Amino acid sequence: MNYKQIQPPDYLKSYVRYFWVLESSDTKTFRPIADGCPGLIFQPSEKGTFYDQAGKQLPAIVLYGQTIRHREIHIRGNFSAMGLSFYPNALKSVFRFDADELTDTCADLREVSKKQDLYLLDQLMSANSASHQIEYLSAYLLAQISKSNPHQDRPMQYALSQMIKSEGSVSLKELQQKLIITERSFERKFKHYVGISPKLFSRICRFQASLNQLRTNRFGKLSDIAFDNGYADQSHFIRVFKEFSGSVPDRYRKQSNELIGNSPDWL
């Protein structure tokens, strides 16, 4: 198995966290994990096929939103795939639609590209290397950004940055008051901007902080992770961990071989 991450060009660094490329000769199961970020996957059918847990074949190029429920994607045969991880607000900033339209689901990007007279799939299929695929995809995203003329919702961007910086521990009530906005308006605008409610995004930030602590072995026992990240007790931490990852911490730690940012367990 060969996996690598590639930094985006400078003009995309406000929207794209990184590109990734993956090649393998093994049949794999892809288990999405909530990380607060949408993304994109390109998987040409002649180089492997993605199926969801119901056995339905997924499109060759998929744009997905926030992941909040455990699910499985299966890959059969030898495969080669590439994709990218966006920043949390990229669906709104780049594609100009409300991010909650894709929460826990995905869209066939071929339809989006055809509407824009950009035949992205044809370009990606004709590329003779991953670097060329990334060039085509970067050009497509730049065209989307130019057409949409994105503007940052400064209040929502501030709230988002504070949640990330505090790893989900910032007071949402205090954020709401600082932004001089009602609770209902705050939740509605944040859902459009990020795809999920402020409370759920904060919970995912906290989960990600605990997951990072688990991965890097910075703990003596599980209760240390629970208390370090503001969970009431170890049982609470385990329940939340299973909710967002589909596995309990001990099992995840023993069996996972993480590769890709949002959703990366290949078992």
Image: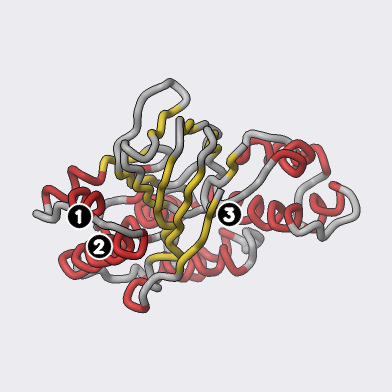
Secondary structure under tag 1 reads helix
Dot 3: within a 10 Å radius of its alpha carbon, few (fewer than 14), some, or many (20 or more) residues? many
Instruction: Name the residue type under label 2.
Output: Tyr
Instruction: Say above or below: 18 vs 187.
Output: below
Instruction: Name the residue type under label 3.
Output: Ser
Mark 3 to mark 1: distance in Å?
A: 38 Å
Number of labelled discs? 3
Q: In the rendered image, which residue does mark 2 sit on?
A: 136
Q: Say whether residue 168 is visible.
A: yes
Q: Position of residue 233 (x, y in %)?
A: 83, 44
Dot 2: within a 10 Å radius of its alpha carbon, few (fewer than 14), some, or many (20 or more) residues? some
Relative horizontal placement of residue 261, taking residue 62 as reference (left or right): right
Q: In the rendered image, which residue does mark 3 sit on?
A: 202
Instruction: Name the residue type under label 1.
Output: Gln
Q: Position of residue 264 (x, y in %)?
A: 56, 46
Dot 1: within a 10 Å radius of its alpha carbon, few (fewer than 14), some, or many (20 or more) residues? some
Relative horizontal placement of residue 137, taking residue 78 as reference (left or right): left
Q: Position of residue 133 (x, y in %)?
A: 30, 59
